Image (spheres, rainbow, N blue to C red):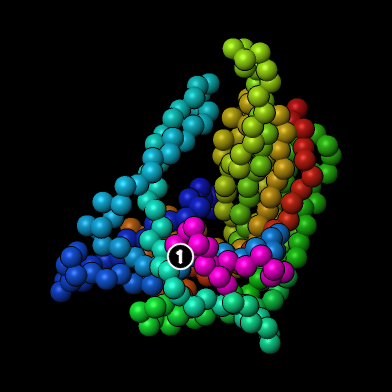
């Protein structure tokens, strides 16, 4: 069993060929999309890779990630580069005899979406993208089967409990996420502040269907500060799982692009997930 903390989206920097310079590099197709059964909204991010020279001038955002360790707060800066989106592409999803055209968000270049598609388990979807510059990209994913969280079933949760779920057909692995609620007294404003956030992303292999709560990353932080939480377990298809599993080691020379990107002619991922959600637990 292998546990990994994986960033939500990985910035892809293309390797520049010997006969190409940063000034002449035009970029290659770069697509990010994970279809999910817990939402009727589909979003396909269509973009181009950038040269290292361009990347260094994109004015990235710096996010301060705060977490609890050894009875103290630690703050780590995380640099996030903007998506190099491409406008004017033709984007569609196909399932069976149905075809859905996705429209570009007028406020976000390269983001194409639809809010009227219902994704069901064990259905195969095809993606078709035609870039304004002529590149045609096709990819396919089969959504893993339905499953459910079977434990814990009580209303309260402790660090001695075990998270368990039934197997999902055709799942390559599972992603565990926690939606947590935190509250604290603001003495200056004399009020109770309530906040929520997703945390504790952890990846496990397909033969794993249980996880002791103590093994979740940042669990000490949860018990010290969170009031309650909801557990999400997502069954990932091969495309989404490999992208997260191998993507963290993408700079390793022994990890090939083919090991974690399964889109012919493009960088990125076109995958899918089936999501099981638990009830809301009060921590004790």
Residue drawn where x is 73% and y is 56% of the image: 276
**Would residue 58 be counted in the magenta stretch?**
no
Where, quadrant-wise, is the C terminus in this rendering? top right
Image quadrant in which you'd find residue 11: bottom left
Q: Look at the image and tell me whether residue 278 can be seen.
A: yes
Q: Vertical placement of 52 versus 73: above or below?
A: below
Q: Looking at this view, is 249 or 42 the one in front?
A: 42
Residue placed furthest toward the bottom: 97
Q: Vertical placement of 1 versus 137: above or below?
A: above
- The residue that label 1 is drawn on is 110
Residue drawn where x is 53% and y is 28% of the image: 68
Q: In the rendered structure, which segment of residues is drawn in magenta? A: 102-118
Taking the image as shown, residue 235 lies to the left or right of residue 91, namely right
Q: Position of residue 248 (x, y in %)?
A: 43, 55
Residue placed furthest toward the front: 106
Q: Position of residue 224 (x, y in %)?
A: 63, 25
**Would residue 106 be counted in the magenta stretch?**
yes
Residue drawn where x is 49% and y is 57% of the image: 107
Q: Position of residue 216 (x, y in %)?
A: 61, 41
Q: Look at the image and tell me whether residue 265 can be seen.
A: no
Residue drawn where x is 58% and y is 66% of the image: 113
Q: How many other residues sit within 10 Å of disc 1, few (<14), some (14-19) or many (≥20)?
A: many
Q: Position of residue 3 (x, y in %)?
A: 54, 50
Residue placed furthest toward the right: 154
């Amino acid at each position: 069993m292998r546990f990994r903390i994986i960033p939500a989206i990985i910035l892809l920097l293309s390797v520049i060929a010997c006969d190409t310079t940063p000034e002449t590099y035009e970029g290659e197709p770069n697509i990010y999309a994970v279809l999910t059964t817990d939402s009727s909204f589909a979003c396909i991010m269509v973009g181009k890779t950038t040269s290292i020279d361009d990347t260094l001038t994109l004015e990235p955002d710096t996010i301060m990630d705060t977490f609890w360790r050894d009875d103290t707060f630690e703050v780590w800066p995380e640099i996030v580069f903007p998506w190099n989106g491409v406008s004017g592409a033709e984007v569609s999803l196909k399932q069976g005899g149905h075809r859905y055209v996705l429209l570009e968000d007028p406020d976000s270049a390269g983001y194409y979406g639809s809010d009227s598609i219902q994704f069901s388990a064990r259905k195969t979807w095809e993606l078709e993208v035609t870039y304004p510059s002529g590149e045609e990209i096709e990819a396919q994913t089969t959504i893993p089967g339905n499953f459910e969280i079977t434990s814990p079933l009580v209303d309260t949760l402790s660090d001695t409990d075990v998270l368990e779920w039934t197997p999902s057909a055709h799942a390559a692995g599972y992603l565990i996420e926690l939606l947590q609620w935190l509250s604290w007294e603001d003495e200056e404003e004399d009020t109770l502040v309530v906040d929520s956030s997703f945390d504790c992303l952890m990846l496990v292999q397909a033969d794993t269907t249980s996880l002791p709560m103590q093994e979740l990353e940042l669990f000490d932080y949860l018990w010290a500060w969170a009031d309650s939480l909801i557990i999400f377990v997502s069954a990932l298809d091969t495309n989404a799982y490999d992208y997260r599993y191998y993507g963290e080691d993408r700079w390793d020379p022994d990890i090939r692009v083919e090991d974690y990107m399964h889109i012919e002619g493009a960088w990125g991922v076109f995958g899918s997930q089936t999501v099981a959600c638990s009830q809301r637990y009060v921590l004790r």
